[in-house]
Image (cartoon, grey):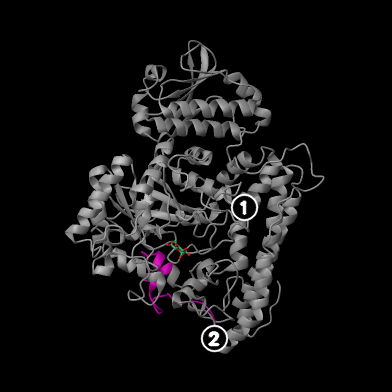
């Protein structure tokens, strides 16, 4: 079997080389394209503020004046954003005033900053929506119709402003508004895997946004635009350095640079967090060890926390990747993850900071299967963490695979709050070359029922703290914006950043609504065009899964995490290979994680455990994740597993290819520059999806011994 794999590897080398050469992207505009739609470069993301089309007359009637009272940095930002947005959308300025004048107006503020809003006596309603929530209501004042955007907090007023602008950008009616919004979780954070040398781990859109050589003196205008787009979807914090953390970020020199970013982002409601290297007391402080129970280590972190809070009074806290993939951690000293986290939590607690401890750990000593390890390690520590410590868990138990069942720690941690870690960066999902909208994938995850406290205990509710009473709630996404003009490499990758923000705000929103909002704001309000873009986005994830890893297959890749490499059997660790996971041989394929196999299903609550365990009830999308099946196993469709696999790969590649034609039908409806840039990437995607299909099927055919037959 080994030999068959090796021969296959040699034969496929040429194919892989061609795959990477094919990834070159040409950035020149299409000659002769429709000149009526001016070219855009994608820099403005979803805050383009293009004229909203047919609704503009209604808007002009109802918005003659903008009133923003108060003199804080945030109220100035609100005034500026509204003024420039309305100007761009309406083609003429709308005055912004600090004083009420009887005119159709939009009034924004808090009872503390705005006399007009105080006069409305909405305090009780505003207390209910909290400091980040807001109310948008149409009402009348001195005979004039006005729209009030009110919040108990200034950041809530900013969020309300962006919500209102979204209504205009997407062409919705603003008559008789009665909107009450409150985020479902407290922490809505981005995780950047940016290194201090300007590179980005798993970044596909250029170098890091953070210009460490220029900070703190020079503030790149991108930092402000970054804050604006994040605030526009309610993101309220960013961990700005890689979890594989360089200790230098904790030096005085770097902390001053970090403080400059924190100062700039504060009025946008964005708090800065840092990834901390657990060995910092040794590597930076010169201590002999970093044992969390050593008083000298405890003092070192206390002093470090004091130093940070002197510079950044609202510093969010530390994110820690410990004892994972070579990172140092408490287990180096025979201590538990909880002991490590608690030591840092104690250092941060007097200042109001938190520790976010990652559950992305997979020690071989814990269990032979990587899927089971984090659950085993963390459930035995449940309840041992300090009140200001949370555990951050990736959506699935391996590592952002195209499709994974939800991680059993969601619902499994009853006393220790968990945050969900998602990945907008398309590390395993075509990177910046494939169009893959993550809204649908994340909804499948968020809507999964854990049954932790009976039916309806969805992951989304767990995250809200509605299943177990968590003190801290939140969602996090790894993101990769870089210095590429369009921030994300692929114009459609921007949608994943947007979708994360919207779902972190409200996980009950539909993937479809989010896709449509994004398409309207990013491309056009033309209904048929929006329908086409939204539909492309909605099917794109399932398409990607079909031509890469359908039916529960996972990790069929090599080190680049991009190209197919099912023959990968020689990585530094067994659980970094592909063969460890698919286990294909002449008898069949798949990983037996049932009660008769390695019992991974038992980490789920009943009836989920039984649903996955039972071959008849296991959703086929997870079949080979939980079950080992013979090649002639009968699928629900009546087809043999081998044929079903062939069908998936063929239909996936066909759908990927069909996206090109669909996109081509939008030529002239979208500016030619962005149209061409997307078209170029769709061509790569179509070619690479066919390579995935052929490579995987040819490889598995070595074991199935059956012909590759298109559907
Ligand atoms: C930041 C995967 C990625 C690594 C990443 C790691 C993590 O293994 O490939 O690049 O490291 O996850 O999430 O810590």
User: Where residue 667 sits in the image (x, y, percent)?
Assistant: 76, 46
Q: Secondary structure at mark 2?
A: loop
Please state, as top left, top right, bottom left or bottom right, where the N terminus lies in the image: bottom right
User: Where residue 214 sits in the image (x, y, percent)?
Assistant: 47, 44
Dot 2: within a 10 Å radius of its alpha carbon, few (fewer than 14), some, or many (20 or more) residues?
few
Q: Which residues are magenta?
A: 587-611
Q: Quadrant of ligand 1?
A: bottom left
In this picture, residue 16 sits left or right of residue 66: right
User: Where residue 184 sits in the image (x, y, percent)?
Assistant: 40, 43
545 relative to 105, above or below: below
Image mark for residue 587:
2
Write the residue at 59% across / 40% down. 44
461 relative to 327, above or below: above
Cα distance, mark 2 to mark 1?
A: 41 Å
The image quarter containing residue 438 is bottom right
Image mark for residue 490:
1
The residue lying furthest to the left in this view is: 295
The answer to which of 363 and 130 lies nearer the viewer is 363
- Which circle, 2 or 1, is nearer the viewer? 1
Q: Going from the N terminus, do you reach mark 2 or mark 1 first? A: 1
280 relative to 675, above or below: below
Q: Is residue 183 visible?
A: no
In this picture, residue 599 sits left or right of residue 543: left
Image mark for residue 402:
none
Q: Is residue 202 visible?
A: yes
Dot 1: within a 10 Å radius of its alpha carbon, few (fewer than 14), some, or many (20 or more) residues?
many
The answer to which of 261 and 125 lies nearer the viewer is 261
């Amino acid at each position: 079997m080994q030999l068959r794999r090796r021969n296959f590897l040699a034969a496929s080398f040429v194919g892989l080389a061609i795959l990477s050469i094919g990834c070159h992207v040409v950035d020149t505009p299409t000659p002769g394209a429709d000149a009526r739609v001016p070219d855009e470069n994608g820099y403005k993301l979803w805050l383009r503020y293009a004229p909203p089309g047919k609704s503009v007359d209604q808007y002009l009637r109802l918005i003659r004046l903008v009133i923003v009272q108060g003199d804080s940095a945030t109220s100035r930002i609100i005034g500026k954003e509204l003024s420039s947005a309305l100007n761009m959308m309406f083609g003429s300025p709308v005055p912004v005033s600090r004083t009420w004048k009887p005119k159709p107006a939009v009034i924004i503020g808090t009872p503390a900053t705005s006399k007009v809003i105080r006069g409305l006596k909405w305090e009780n309603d505003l207390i209910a929506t909290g400091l980040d929530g807001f109310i948008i209501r149409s009402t009348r004042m001195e005979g004039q119709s006005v729209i009030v955007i009110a919040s108990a907090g200034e950041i809530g007023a900013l969020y309300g402003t962006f919500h209102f602008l979204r209504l205009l950008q997407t062409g919705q009616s603003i008559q008789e508004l009665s909107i009450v919004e409150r985020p479902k979780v407290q922490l809505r954070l981005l995780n950047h895997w940016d290194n201090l040398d300007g590179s980005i781990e798993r970044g596909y859109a250029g170098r890091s946004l953070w210009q460490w050589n220029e900070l703190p003196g020079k503030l790149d205008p991108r930092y402000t635009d970054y804050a604006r787009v994040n605030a526009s979807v309610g993101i309220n914090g960013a961990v700005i350095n890689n979890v594989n953390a360089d200790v230098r970020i904790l030096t005085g020199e770097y902390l001053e640079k970090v403080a400059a970013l924190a100062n700039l982002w504060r009025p946008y409601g964005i708090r800065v967090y840092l990834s901390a290297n657990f060995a910092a007391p040794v590597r930076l402080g010169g201590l002999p060890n970093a044992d969390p129970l050593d008083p000298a280590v405890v003092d070192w972190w206390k002093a470090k926390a004091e130093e940070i809070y002197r510079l950044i009074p609202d510093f969010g806290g530390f994110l820690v990747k410990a004892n994972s993939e070579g990172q140092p951690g408490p287990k180096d000293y025979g201590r538990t993850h909880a002991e490590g986290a608690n030591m840092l939590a104690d250092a941060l607690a007097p200042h109001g900071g938190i520790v976010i401890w990652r559950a992305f750990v997979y020690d071989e000593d814990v269990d032979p299967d990587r899927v089971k390890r984090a659950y085993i390690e963390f459930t035995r520590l449940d309840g041992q963490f300090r009140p200001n410590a949370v555990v951050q868990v990736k959506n699935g138990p391996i590592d952002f695979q195209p499709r994974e069942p939800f991680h059993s720690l969601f619902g499994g941690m009853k006393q220790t709050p968990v945050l969900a870690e998602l990945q907008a960066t398309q590390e395993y999902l075509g990177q910046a070359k494939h169009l893959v909208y993550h809204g649908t994938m994340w909804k499948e995850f968020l809507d999964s029922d854990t049954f932790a406290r009976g039916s309806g205990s969805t992951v989304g509710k767990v995250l809200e703290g509605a299943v177990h009473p968590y003190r801290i709630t939140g969602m996090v996404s790894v993101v990769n914006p870089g210095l590429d003009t369009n921030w994300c490499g692929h114009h459609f990758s921007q949608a994943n950043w947007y979708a994360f923000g919207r779902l972190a705000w409200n996980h009950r929103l539909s993937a479809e609504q989010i896709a449509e909002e994004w398409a309207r704001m990013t491309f056009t309000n033309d209904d048929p065009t929006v329908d086409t873009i939204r539909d492309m986005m909605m099917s794109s994830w399932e398409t990607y899964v079909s031509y890469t890893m359908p039916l529960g297959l996972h990790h069929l890749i090599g080190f680049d995490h991009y190209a197919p490499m099912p023959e990968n059997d020689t990585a530094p660790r067994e659980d970094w290979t592909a063969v460890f996971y698919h286990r294909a041989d002449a008898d069949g394929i798949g990983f037996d994680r049932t009660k008769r196999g390695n019992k991974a299903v038992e980490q789920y609550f009943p009836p989920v455990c039984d649903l996955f365990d039972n071959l008849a009830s296991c959703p086929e999308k997870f079949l080979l994740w939980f079950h080992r099946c013979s090649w002639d196993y009968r699928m629900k469709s009546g087809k043999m597993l081998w044929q079903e696999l062939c069908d998936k790969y063929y239909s996936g590649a066909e759908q990927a290819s069909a996206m090109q034609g669909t996109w081509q039908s939008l030529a002239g409806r979208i500016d030619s520059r962005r149209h061409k840039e997307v078209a170029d990437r769709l061509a790569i995607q179509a070619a690479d999806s066919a390579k995935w299909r052929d490579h995987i099927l040819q490889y598995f055919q070595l074991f199935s011994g059956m012909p590759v037959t298109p559907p």
